[in-house]
Amino acid sequence: MNRQFDHVGLVTYEPQENESWVEESQCWVSNPRLHPQRIEYLRPKEKPEVDPSDVGLWKLWNFPHMAFRVDNLDEAIKGEEIILEPFDPGGFGRVAFIHKDGAVIEYMEYYDLNTWFGQPTPWRPPEPE
C-alpha cells in the first residue's frame, strides 16, 4: 500500500481563515495546502465531551493527528482500531481516522488532489525554505 504524508491536524477553538464545514464530524477545517507547514486546523462546533476511556476519540479532540494519502482507504484501515469510519468530508475523497501506536492517524483516499471542498487548490509537495 502506498502511503504519503499529507498534513498535520491541530484542534483549535479560534476561527481560521477559509474554513470549510464538515457535517460528519461537526467541525470546521482549514485547507492544509494553503499553510506553509501543511497544518490543518479543526474547530469543533462545540467542544466534544469525550470520556478519556475512549482513548482514540479523546486523543482526536485533544492532540494533533498525522494525515497520509493512501491509494486504498479500505485496505489501509483493515484490522485497525477505527475512531471515525470512512466518510467524504467535502467531495474530494474519503477519509477515516484510526488509533495506532498511541497516535491518531487520518488516512485519505483522494478522488481529486486539485480541489478542497469544491475550491481549486492544486496539490504540490511542500517546498524547502
Image (cartoon, helix red, strand yellow):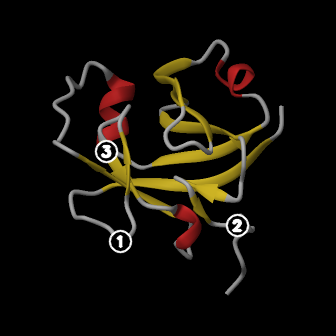
In primary-sequence order, the first of circles 2 and 3 is 3
Which label sits on residue 27?
3
Q: In this picture, is 87 found above or below 18?
A: above
Residue in view at x 39 percent, y 67 percent:
18
- Residue type of the residue flagged with mark 1: Glu
Taking the image as shown, residue 22 lies to the left or right of residue 39, namely left
Q: Residue furthest front?
A: 118
* Distance from Cα at disc 1 to Cα at disc 3: 14 Å
- Residue type of the residue flagged with mark 2: Pro
The residue beneath circle 1 is 17
Q: Residue furthest bottom?
A: 129
* Distance from Cα at disc 2 to Cα at disc 1: 18 Å
Quadrant that contains the C terminus? bottom right
Q: Quadrant of residue 75?
A: top right
The residue beneath circle 2 is 122
Asked whether 30 or 118 is in front, the reply is 118
Mark 1: which secondary structure?
Answer: loop
